[in-house]
Amino acid sequence: MVRVKRGLMTRKRHKSLLKATKGYRLLSSRVFSRAKNAWMKAGQNAFVGRKRKKRDFRRLWTVRINIASRDNGTTYSKLIHNLYTKKVTLNRKVLSNLAISNPTVFSNIVKFVK
């Protein structure tokens, strides 16, 4: 049987992974075994971060709507409940942007829902 030498592909794989981990701290950017672990962990954190981002933005929108609705004499939960009962289909992102950029329009929405 013919001997297979695998150094070429190993070096290519190592170089591409070390290129991907360029900028990591200490040995995580220079030693392959450490770099591979750091790269895998970074991928996991990126996946979790993409899920967390949606949560964090929804929380931010809720806080903004709550502050603006309290300025208009109601609470967040009452406002959202009244929006559902009146069948107003504005999502939290739009309401949050209205509360920041157009407070008068937001207050008109609150008055309509009350």
Image (cartoon, rainbow, N blue to C red):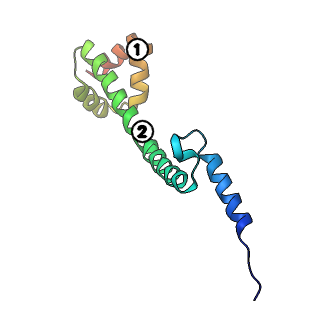
Q: Against 53, is 1 above or below?
A: below
Find the residue positioned furthest to the top: 104
Residue drawn at 54 percent across, 55 percent down: 36
For residue 77, what is the image quadrant?
A: top left
Name the quarter where the C terminus is drawn.
top left
Q: CA distance from mark 2 to mark 1?
A: 26 Å
Name the side, left or right, on which 50 lies relative to 17.
left
> For residue 8, which numbered disc appears in the image?
none
Q: Are marks 2 and 1 in contact (CB under 8 Å)?
A: no
Q: Secondary structure at mark 1?
A: helix
> Residue at the spot x=37%, y=30% of the render?
88
* Residue 27 located left or right of residue 69: right
109 or 42, nearer to the observer: 42
User: Where's residue 32, x and y in %?
Assistant: 58, 55
Residue drawn where x is 74% and y is 78% of the image: 4
In the picture shown, does residue 40 fall above or below 104?
Answer: below
The residue indicated by pointer 2 is 54
Q: Residue tagged by mark 1? A: 105
First in sequence, mark 2 or 1: give its number.
Answer: 2
| Residue type for callout 1 | Val
